[in-house]
Image: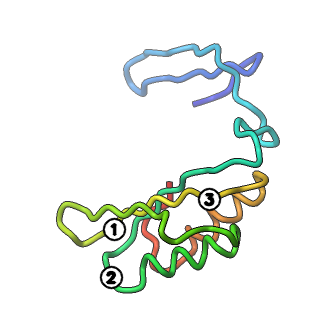
Amino acid sequence: MTTGLAGRQHLAAAGRGLSIDCAMPIPPATESLISYPCDFPIKVMGPAQDGFQEAIVRVVRDFDPDFQADSVEVRPSSGGRYLGLTLTVHVHSRTQLDNLYRALHGHEMVSVVL
């Protein structure tokens, strides 16, 4: 993917000679499509082991001290080896949200953060 003139994206399918020219501009990294403050859902996946949910709640509370642990939505994987957690956090800025994502991504028990 490359960005062309006037913020247009050019997508090319390798080896097929196809291209799509999209008129939607890409916002600069300094802009956000999210209005703050807001409640923002984050999905975290990791092993279905004792302490996983509690560890993730502790990380989230470092960034949202009022986060309620009983609001976490928990979904086990079909094989039961993993848990998917949805945590809706109250964030005040993009920096706060970015730092929370980094902290979750860097946690040793976390496989995926969405």
How packed mark 1 is, by other alpha carbons closer than 10 Å (few <14, some 14-19, many 20 or more), is: many
Please tell me in which quadrant of the rendered image residue 85 appears: bottom left
Q: Please name whichever residue, 55 or 67, is drawn nearer the observer in this view of the structure.
A: 67
* Of callouts 1 and 3, the N-terminal one: 1
Q: Check disc 3 and report the residue beneath it.
A: 89
Indicate the secondary structure of the residue bearing disc 1: strand
Please state which amino acid type lies under the numbered disc 3: Val
Task: Check if mark 1's residue and mark 3's residue have beta carbons within 8 Å.
Answer: no
Indicate left or right for 84 with 99 as reference.
left
Indicate the secondary structure of the residue bearing disc 3: strand
Q: Check disc 2 and report the residue beneath it.
A: 49
Q: Please name whichever residue, 41 or 2, is drawn nearer the observer in this view of the structure.
A: 41
Image location of residue 107, percent across then percent down = 54, 77
Q: Check disc 1 and report the residue beneath it.
A: 83
Image location of residue 103, percent across then percent down = 63, 71
Please tell me in which quadrant of the rendered image residue 3 appears: top right
- Image quadrant holding the N terminus, namely top right
How far apart are labels 2 and 1 at the CA level?
8 Å
Indicate left or right for 6 with 56 as reference.
right
Q: Is residue 38 above or below residue 31?
A: below
The count of marks equals 3
Please state which amino acid type lies under the numbered disc 2: Gln
Indicate the secondary structure of the residue bearing disc 2: loop
Please state which amino acid type lies under the numbered disc 1: Leu
Q: Is residue 83 above or below residue 31?
A: below
Image location of residue 84, percent across then percent down = 37, 62
The residue sitting at 50% across, 54% down in the picture is: 114
How far apart are labels 1 and 3 at the CA level?
18 Å
The residue sitting at 41% across, 65% down in the picture is: 45
